[in-house]
Image: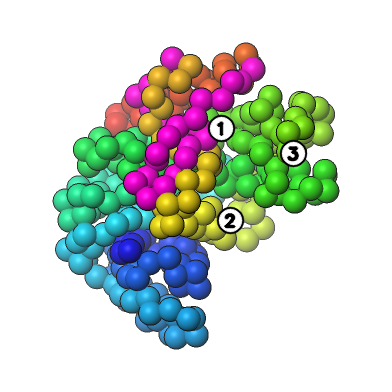
Amino acid sequence: MKITLVGTGRVGSAIAFALTINPLASELLLLNRSREKAEGDALDLTHAAALVDSNIKISSGEIADSKDSDVIIFTASVPFRYPNQTRLEMGIDNMPILRDWMPGLAKASPNAIVVMVSNPVDALAYETIRLTGFDPKRVIGTGTLVDSIRYRALLSTELKIHAQDIRAYILGEHGDTQFAASSIAMTGGERFYPSDTSRRMFEETKAMGYEVFRLKGHTSYGIAMATITILDSIAYDLRHTMPVSVLVDGYLGVEDVCLSLPAVIGREGVTRILHPTLSEDEEAAFRNSAEVVKQTLVEMEAGQ
C-alpha cells in the first residue's frame, strides 16, 4: 500500500513516525510546502526504519510523485497560534492550502482514500469531497475520534475498566458543539446513564486539547494515534467502528455536511454509517452541530 502524507509539521511528523514503527504501507511519501523539511523527515525516518523489521520505502517529493497512492493523509495547516483560536479563523487560513493541494493530489490518485486531519476537520472534509468529486465514502475526517479516545480514557480511570472495553462516543462537530452520546454508552451490555461524573468528564474531554496546548504548545501524539487507528482499519480491512467525520446521509434529517457518527472503516473507506438511537437532547445537539458547521462553511467561503 502506498501512503502519501501532506504536511510534515508536528502532527504530520508524528503520524509519519507512527507509520515507520508500525509499517502499514510499503511506501510512504512525504509532501510539504517546504520541500527541505519533508526531505529531512524522510531521511530521519529512513534511518529509524533500519531498526524496524520492514522494507518500507520512505521518500519526499512533489504531487506528481504521489501518483497511484492508496491513501492520502492531509495534515497541512497554518500554525495553531493560540488555544482559543476559532475554527473560522483556522478555516479561512487553511481553505486556500487545501485548494492548492487537493485537486492535484486527486488527479494523481483518483482511487485514493483521503484521511483529513487538518482543522476545522468537518468543514475541510466536506470541501475535500467537493474539490475532488470523490465518492464520499473515500473521504474520512478524523473528527471526534480523538475526543472519544480521551473520553474513554477518563471513564476508564473512573470505572476501573480498560478503555478498549468501553463503548462511549463523542459525536457531532470536532469543536465546541460536540456532545457525549451518553444514552448509548456502555460496557459489557451495561449502560452508563448520564450522571454528574460523566458530565464532568465530558467537560474535561472538551477542554483536553486546549490543556495539552497550554502545557506543551501543541498536540500531536493523540491525533497521530487516532489517525493510525483509521489507517490500520483501512490497510487490513478490519471493519472497525469508530466515530469519524463523514458526509451525513440524512440521519436525523441532516445532510450536505460532514460530522462525526459511528462509521465502519475498511479497505474501501467508509463501508457503513451507523444511525444510533439518541435521546432528544442528543438529537438536538447533533442538529446544532450541523448548523454550526454549515455556517462555518458559508463564512469560510465569504472570507476567501
Query: Which residue corresponds to mark 2?
Result: 222
Query: What is the three-letter code of the residue carrying label 3?
Result: Gly
Does dot 1 land on a helix, a strand or a loop? Answer: strand
Query: Which residue corresponds to mark 3?
Result: 188
Residue 91 shows up from this direction: no
**Image point 37% across, 50% down: which residue?**
267
Residue 36: image x %, image y %?
A: 31, 75
State if disc 2 and disc 3 touch (CB < 8 Å): no
Is residue 236 placed above or below 287 in the rendered structure?
Answer: below
Query: Which residue corresponds to mark 1?
Result: 171
Residue 18 shows up from this direction: yes
Residue sitting nearer the eye, 64 or 231 = 231
Q: Quadrant of the N terminus?
A: bottom left
Query: What is the three-letter code of the residue carrying label 1?
Result: Leu
Task: State the count of labels.
Answer: 3
Is residue 166 found left or right of 37 in the rendered image? Answer: right
Cα–Cα gap, marks 3 and 2: 26 Å
Cα–Cα gap, marks 1 and 3: 21 Å
Q: Which numbered disc flags the more N-terminal residue, 3 or 2?
A: 3
Residue 132: image x %, image y %?
A: 22, 42
Does dot 3 land on a helix, a strand or a loop? Answer: loop
Is residue 39 placed above or below 143 in the rendered structure?
Answer: below
Residue sitting nearer the eye, 94 or 249 = 249
Please tell me whether the stretch drawn in magenta is mainly helix, strand or loop.
strand
Q: Quadrant of residue 279?
A: top right
The magenta stretch is 253-279
Cα–Cα gap, marks 1 and 2: 17 Å
Does dot 2 land on a helix, a strand or a loop? Answer: helix
**Image point 29% across, 72% down: which residue?**
60
